[in-house]
């Protein structure tokens, strides 16, 4: 995670200029700096997250493509099997009709 520079001294001076006491300004500046350090994302942080998400999406796409290929192959096997069963049934019915009773 990239560090963000925060000028606490300059911030304290500005707060004191608008009426904060030294103690109030220092506490506020310290907390502000802590929040910035702990919670604020930098452009590099966001770029890392974006790259990670793109890798995850690509991996999910590859898994989905593989699953679709498996399903297609399974469907073809099923259709061919049913087709063969129907052909055998039809041939058997024709043979039974042609045979003398």
Image (cartoon, rainbow, N blue to C red):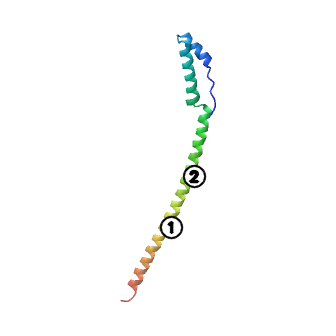
Taking depth in this image into account, of 43 and 3 the one nearest to the observer is 3
Residue 2 at x, y percent in the picture: 63, 31
* Residue 77, above or below 43: below
Residue shown at the point (55%, 50%) measured from the top left? 61
Estimate how packed mark 1 is, as few (under 14), some (14 to 19) or many (20 or more) residues with alpha carbons within 10 Å: few
- Residue 4: percent from the left, percent from the top? 62, 27
Q: Which residue is mark 2?
A: 62
Return the disc, 1 or 2, that comes first in the chain's sequence.
2
Compare residues 53 and 12 and report the one nearer the observer: 12
Q: Quadrant of the C terminus?
A: bottom left
Tell me which corner region of the image, top left, top right, bottom left or bottom right, holds residue 99. bottom left
Q: Which residue is mark 1?
A: 77
Q: Is residue 19 left or right of residue 47?
A: left
Rendered location of residue 76, percent (x, y): 50, 65
Relative to 2, does residue 73 appear above or below in the rendering? Answer: below
Label 1 close to label 2 by CB (< 8 Å): no
Q: Choose between 25 and 36: the one closer to the eye.
A: 25
């Amino acid at each position: 995670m990239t560090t963000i520079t925060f000028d606490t001294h300059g911030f304290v001076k500005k707060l004191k200029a608008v009426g904060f006491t030294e103690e109030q300004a220092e506490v506020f500046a310290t907390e502000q700096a802590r929040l910035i350090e702990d919670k604020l994302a930098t452009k590099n942080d966001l770029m890392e997250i974006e790259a990670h998400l793109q890798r995850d999406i690509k991996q999910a796409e590859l898994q989905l493509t593989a699953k679709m290929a498996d399903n297609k192959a399974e469907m073809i096997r099923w259709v061919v099997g049913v087709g063969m069963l129907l052909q055998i049934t039809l041939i058997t019915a024709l043979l039974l009709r042609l045979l003398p009773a």
